[in-house]
């Protein structure tokens, strides 16, 4: 591995338009790299996430590891969707058959539907109380108290988020999180991800904020948060599930679209996340002797 260039691909995910959506780097040949080297490379690239694909386990079956610039994640949505699209574009899989991507959270089955890749979350949705109350949420986000239309909750399909419902897209656009309030109300929970949403039937407008190193950053498209939100909404529907179309990244100039489905099976809600992706570039790291 160290004797040759370490190549990677750049994709924009949850969009079919280059230079929109959420950027992603994928290394298709990561054998021989340990976790520390993967983390250092992800930090060097400084994208929301970087994926390292391991040795094929069988037909349409690959292990993956996902890193932000500061930590490894058990699961993330846009890396799963982007990796699936890249494997298909490189002719490494049969898109007529399910693809299995094995992340630390567990195996995820991916199916292709036209221009979309759609994965099933490895674990059912978990929903619980958030450490963030309405008043604290308003202070954190720089909004009037009435802009928070219900109690925030915490939900996860492998990666937890605080979910905060807002009254309008106008309020969503005004959000300016305060790091001091974040450290007081979010950090003690150990869940350093906040997902804001405005619901209009099956159409949702969202924004994601994440603590990274000493500050806060916004994410243009967050499949793991969309999965958590769909799981939560799925617990509230009478018909045993639902489907939603999510817009994100608009305020960042990187519009994205995420499609989510939820279905109830007994006491559990299972989620699927779908989206497009487009290959936009390639690169390589020089050998490190």
Image (cartoon, grey):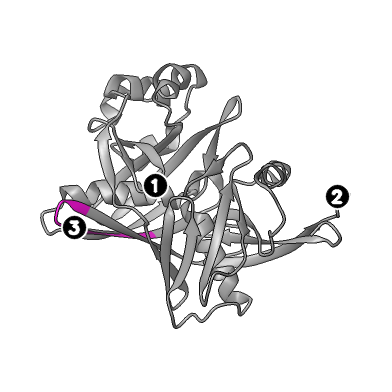
Question: In the image shown, does 65 or 34 lie closer to the viewer?
Answer: 34
Q: Position of residue 63 (x, y in %)?
A: 54, 61
The tag on residue 288 is 2
Looking at the image, tell me whether mark 1 or mark 2 is earlier in sequence order.
1
Circle 1 crowding by C-alpha within 10 Å: few under 14, some 14–19, many from 20: many
Q: Is residue 50 above or below residue 150?
A: below
Q: Secondary structure at mark 3?
A: strand
Q: Is residue 191 above or below residue 95?
A: above
Q: Residue at x 85, y 50 (%)?
A: 288
Image quadrant of residue 190? top left
Looking at the image, tell me whether mark 3 or mark 1 is earlier in sequence order.
1
Looking at the image, tell me whether mark 3 or mark 2 is earlier in sequence order.
3
Q: Position of residue 133 (x, y in %)?
A: 28, 23
Residue 103 visible in the snapshot: yes
Q: Residue at x 64, y 46 (%)?
A: 47
Mark 3 and mark 1 residues within 8 Å of each other at the beta carbon:
no
The Cα–Cα distance between marks 3 and 2, rounded to whole angstroms, is 49 Å
Circle 3 crowding by C-alpha within 10 Å: few under 14, some 14–19, many from 20: many
Look at mark 3 in the image and give the residue it sits on. 264
Residue 16 visible in the snapshot: no
Look at mark 1 in the image and give the residue it sits on. 158
Magenta segment, which residues?
259-268
Q: Is residue 36 left or right of residue 185?
A: right
Specify whether residue 224 is painted magenta. no
């Amino acid at each position: 591995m160290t004797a040759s260039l370490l190549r990677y691909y750049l994709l924009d995910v949850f969009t079919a338009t280059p230079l929109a959506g959420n950027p992603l780097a994928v290394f298709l040949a990561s054998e021989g790299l340990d976790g520390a080297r993967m983390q250092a490379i992800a930090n060097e690239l400084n994208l929301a996430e970087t994926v390292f694909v391991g040795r094929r386990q069988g037909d349409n079956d690959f292990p993956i590891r996902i890193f932000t610039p500061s930590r490894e994640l058990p699961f993330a949505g846009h890396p799963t969707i982007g990796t699936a699209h890249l494997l298909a574009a490189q002719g490494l899989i049969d898109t007529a058959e399910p693809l299995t991507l094995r992340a630390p959270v567990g195996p995820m089955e991916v199916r292709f539907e036209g221009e979309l890749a759609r994965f099933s979350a490895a674990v059912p949705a978990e929903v619980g109380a958030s450490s963030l109350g309405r008043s604290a949420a308003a202070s954190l986000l720089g909004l009037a108290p009435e802009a928070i239309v219900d109690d925030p909750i915490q939900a996860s399909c492998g990666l937890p988020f605080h979910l905060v419902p807002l009254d309008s897209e106008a309020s969503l656009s005004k959000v300016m999180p305060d790091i001091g309030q974040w450290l007081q109300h979010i950090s003690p929970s150990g869940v350093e991800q906040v997902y804001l949403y405005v619901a209009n039937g099956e159409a949702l407008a969202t924004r994601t904020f994440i603590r990274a190193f000493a500050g806060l950053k916004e994410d243009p498209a967050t499949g793991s948060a969309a999965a958590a939100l769909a799981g939560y909404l799925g617990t509230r529907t009478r018909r045993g599930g639902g489907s939603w179309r999510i817009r994100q990244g608009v305020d960042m100039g990187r519009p994205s679209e995420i499609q989510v489905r939820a279905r109830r099976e007994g006491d559990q809600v299972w989620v699927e996340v779908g989206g497009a992706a487009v290959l936009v570039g390639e690169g390589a790291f020089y050998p490190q002797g």
